[in-house]
Amino acid sequence: MPLLNCTVKSCLYNKDEYCAKGDILVDGRTAKMSEGTSCKSFVERKENASNSCGCGSATPHIQVECKACECTFNKEERCDAEEITIAGRNACKCSDTECGSFSVK
């Protein structure tokens, strides 16, 4: 499982730049660059929501399902990278996020 660094502070699952969801889905079937990918597991944190979403504890390593067919790290729709970054400053929806570690084949 990759070491995940999530800089999407507006995501409900983000706890100190780790993910408390347990697994995520990166989309981008036709992506040729990171901007064509997105974290489909993103849920916007509402004003009164805390970073304690009741999802369990955040861990540095997480299962990443990957639909970015042209990514070097996509091995049978699982991310095979040692480390990935999910980015999306001020994200409000999935399409505002991206896999910063995407590398085209």
Image: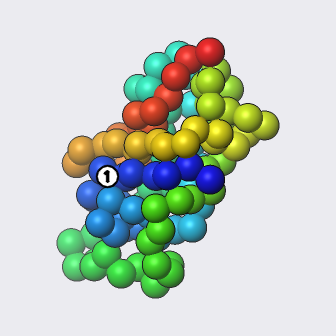
* Picture coordinates of residue 96, whole percent (x, y): 35, 40
62 shown above or below 37: below
The structure residue drawn at horizontal position 65% and vertical position 39%, both measured from the top left corner, is: 80
2 shown above or below 14: above
Residue that lies at the very extreme toward the front in this rendered image: 82
Q: Nearer the viewer, residue 85 or 32?
A: 85
Instruction: Report crowding for label 1: few under 14, some 14 to 19, many 20 or more residues within 10 A (C-alpha).
Output: many
Write down the quadrant of residue 105 in the picture: top right
* Picture coordinates of residue 38, whole percent (x, y): 48, 39
The structure residue drawn at horizontal position 49% and vertical position 43%, both measured from the top left corner, is: 83
Q: Is residue 69 left or right of residue 100?
A: right
Would residue 29 be visible to someone looking at this image?
Answer: no
65 shown above or below 43: above
The structure residue drawn at horizontal position 63% and vertical position 41%, both measured from the top left corner, is: 79
Would residue 26 be visible to someone looking at this image?
Answer: yes
Total marks in image: 1
* Picture coordinates of residue 51, whole percent (x, y): 31, 75
Q: Nearer the viewer, residue 69 or 63?
A: 63
Residue that lies at the very extreme toward the right in this rendered image: 76
Q: Nearer the viewer, residue 91 or 66?
A: 66
The structure residue drawn at horizontal position 47% and vertical position 68%, both measured from the top left corner, is: 59
Amino acid identity at mark 1: Val
Give the residue pinned by disc 1.
8
Q: How is the image coloured?
A: rainbow
Write down the quadrant of residue 77 in the picture: top right
* Picture coordinates of residue 78, whole percent (x, y): 70, 43
Q: Is residue 80 left or right of residue 82?
A: right
Question: What secondary structure is found at the residue carrying circle 1?
Answer: loop
